[in-house]
Amino acid sequence: MNNFLIESNCPVINNKSPGNCLYAYIMETIDLGIVILGVKEKEIVFKNKFASDLFQDNDDNLGYRALLTLLLSEDGKVPPNEIIGKAYTLWYKNRLLGYTPYMISNRFIWVIIRDITERSRLESIAEAVNSMENISYIFSGIRHELGNPINSIKMTLSVLKKNLNNYSTNAVEKFVDRAMTEISRVEFLLQALKSFSIFENPNIQNIILEEFLISFISLVSSDLSQSGIKISKLIVPPVEKISADQRLLHQVMLNLITNASDALKNCENPNIFIRAEKKDGFVAVTVEDNGCGMSEEEQTNLFKPFYTTKTQGTGLGLMITLKMVTLMKGHMEIKSLKDVGTKATVFIPEGKKNE
Ligand SMILES: Nc1ncnc2c1ncn2[C@@H]1O[C@H](COP(=O)(O)OP(=O)(O)OP(=O)(O)O)[C@@H](O)[C@H]1O
Ligand SMILES: [Mg+2]
């Protein structure tokens, strides 16, 4: 294979005038896979570093026929013209690859390959979240998320089973580690999903906000006081009843309080203040903290799934909170100032007068 090696006297690397190795340098550093297959000689003419890393590890090294079969034609024959220039996707070793093959004369096929795993994962979940009215979107995203690691565990274990007698202890350990990594992914997802079951059939009723907040605060106050956090509340008259689902509201408040309490770690005089007042036909319930706050840029990511700055966070808390508030026909907003604090407000419909 004709690999474009980067020479140590490369003028680009040495900051002199660009020469031929400029192209080689780009080829080797770009985060796009490029593979050129020689159709006549049945050989891989070129494979850049990104493609080599994708299609090769210690266990296997894909040759011409294997690559052709994987990317272009199931029978390993040169593909017909109609597949050239079109975009395809492929799951390979846990990565979702997007790729397009091109033909150069009838001697070479070159394939350009992108790793779109992350993009597709976020897009599919973001799409689910945007379609608030259709919860099944969320579940299809989750099926997809769970399906991948489980498939990969299955494959890893079946290879291991077949080779149990001829693999060295080191090789076995490698396979077991691979399966364990995938199991951690599943665990992470299950943890993220624990709040989803309460989405079924919200039970919207009149709730007396003062009573709800008194009992809610009594539940969270001992945890908060252990972290030295003071919590207080103010209900501005004439706020009285709201129209909400008790369990959803509890979860919403819990998510907001947990975020506030996380933001208050290592802060002086940590305080959480809950304030409820009427606003535009809603009752606005604000959870305010004097914690670390967020920059404007950080705030743009808040409702994106899996966005987290915490080592133990799932990054689904606010997304789920927003979903629950929407199910109660409300909305929410978050305002924050870096190093000053954060105000998270949920707008819940007022209670019905005659109930
Ligand atoms: N009150 C707050 N003060 C400062 N930053 C906050 C606050 N609330 C949320 N954030 C930021 O928004 C991010 C996303 O919050 P979110 O609740 O969605 O996920 P998380 O708290 O990281 O994880 P979890 O899914 O366990 O709730 C947090 O990681 C944090 O960076
Ligand atoms: Mg959270």
Image (spheres, rainbow, N blue to C red):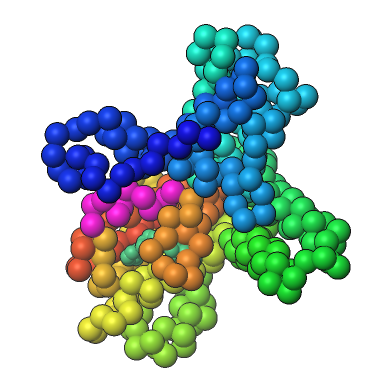
Q: Position of residue 279 (x, y in %)?
A: 32, 50
Residue 73's place in the image compared with 250, above or below, is above
Which residue is drawn at the image coordinates 54% and 66% (left, top)?
250
Question: What x and y, as percent, mark residue 46?
Answer: 49, 31
Front one among 94 and 63: 63
Q: Quadrant holding ligand 1? A: bottom left
Relative to 3, residue 149 above or below: below
Magenta-highlighted residues: 295-304
Residue 101 locus on image (x, y percent): 55, 21
Specify whether 338 is left or right of 239.
Answer: left
- Depth check: 330 or 148 in front? 148
In the rendered structure, the answer to whether residue 278 lies left or right of residue 50 reads left
The reply to whether the magenta stretch includes residue 341 is no
**In the rendered image, which quarter is residue 334 located in?**
bottom left
Q: Taking 166 as reference, is 79 above or below it? A: above
Rendering quarter of residue 163: bottom right
Q: Residue at x 75, y 57 (%)?
A: 156
